[in-house]
């Protein structure tokens, strides 16, 4: 008599991790026989769902703050930094932008500036951190950028792209943003979909990095810790790097 298959492991993870962690989950399943069901979305909203009692085994966030909030509330175990990302600008075709001219363009009233939604999605928080840095370069820039930014992704009511479309490429292609501040990994995926769009790295004076945190939810079975360990392993880290993340070291 064969043993019943183990229940799927429930992974709640930031949307920017979807492609990478799907690959990690597939490799883990081949090695362990345990399947992983991923739910991807804005880290802040996922944290709130777990805090409200939704069942999850592992939470992978695009920041350290949200998993630490769960750990502090006794909802999860320790939090480990497992990957790094960085913000960049995804720019529409025809708009000439360089690292040197990026801030001037972002401040131009005629240029539509897209970001994700602060608090709900760390990507939005990181974008507004860029605005804070801009203030040191041009007084008044922080307020000007915050006031003009269009929050296009990461919120409860954000418009969803058509099936199979990259959200960032879609918003830029549809003209809702001329410049979209997003993770480098998201921008790389967007450019695969629409090579006419281009990526501009933020100048050092505006650069903002993103630390990603991993935690096992309280009460999860031993496979949850096994999956977390796999993410941190050399094999898991290699898969994350293939998708544009920097390793945690």
Image: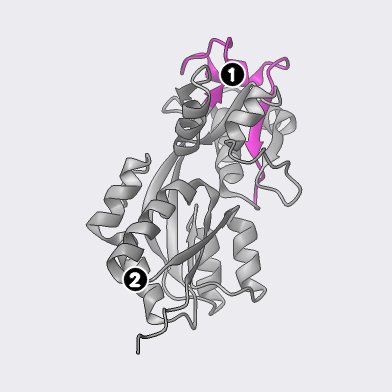
Farthest left residue?
Answer: 234
Where residue 209 appears, as percent x and y from the top left, is 44, 41
> Image check: 220 left or right of 112?
left
> Image check: 97 left or right of 212?
right
Residue highlighted by disc 1: 92
Where residue 56 appears, as percent x and y from the top left, is 54, 72
Look at the image and say whether residue 97 sits in the magenta stretch. yes
**Main SS type for the magenta part?**
loop
Give the residue drawn at x 49%, y 32%: 187
**Badge 2: residue crowd in 10 Å (few <14, some 14–19, many ≥20):** few
Viewer-closest of 170 and 68? 170
Residue highlighted by disc 2: 33
Number of residue marks: 2
Farthest front residue?
Answer: 1
Among the 4 quarters of the image, the one containing residue 95: top right
Give the residue drawn at x 70%, y 31%: 149
Q: Quarter of the image containing the N terminus?
A: bottom left
Query: In terms of secondary structure, where does tag 1 sit?
Result: loop
Give the residue drawn at x 53%, y 20%: 197
Where residue 5 appears, as percent x and y from the top left, is 41, 79
Q: Are marks 1 and 2 in contact (CB under 8 Å)?
A: no
Viewer-closest of 167 and 178? 167
When the figure is inspected, residue 240 is found, relative to residue 58, above or below; the finding is above
Residue range in magenta is: 90-119
Q: Earlier in the sequence, mark 1 or mark 2?
A: 2
Where residue 80 appears, as percent x and y from the top left, is 38, 64
Look at the image and say whether residue 195 sits in the magenta stretch. no
């Amino acid at each position: 008599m064969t043993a019943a298959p183990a229940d799927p492991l429930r992974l709640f993870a930031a949307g920017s991790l979807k492609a990478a962690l799907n690959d990690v989950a597939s490799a883990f399943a081949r090695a362990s026989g345990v399947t992983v069901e991923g739910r991807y979305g804005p880290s802040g909203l996922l944290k709130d769902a777990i805090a409200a009692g939704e069942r999850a085994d592992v939470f992978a966030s695009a920041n350290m703050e949200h998993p630490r909030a769960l750990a502090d509330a006794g909802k999860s175990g320790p939090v480990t930094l497992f990957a790094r990302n960085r913000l960049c600008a995804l720019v529409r075709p025809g708009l000439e932008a360089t690292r040197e001219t990026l801030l001037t363009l972002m401040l131009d009233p005629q240029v539509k500036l897209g970001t994700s939604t602060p608090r709900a999605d760390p990507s939005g928080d990181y974008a507004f951190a860029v605005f804070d840095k801009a203030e040191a370069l041009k007084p008044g820039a922080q307020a000007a950028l915050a006031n003009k930014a269009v929050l296009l992704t990461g919120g409860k009511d954000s418009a969803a792209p058509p099936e199979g479309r990259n959200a960032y490429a879609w918003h830029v292609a549809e003209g809702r943003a001329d410049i979209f501040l997003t993770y480098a990994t998201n921008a790389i995926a967007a450019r695969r979909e629409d090579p006419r769009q281009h990526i501009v790295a933020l100048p050092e004076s505006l650069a903002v990095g993103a630390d990603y945190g991993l935690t096992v939810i309280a009460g999860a079975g031993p496979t949850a810790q096994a999956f977390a360990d796999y993410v941190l392993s050399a094999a898991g880290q290699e898969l994350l790097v293939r998708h544009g993340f920097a390793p945690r070291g």
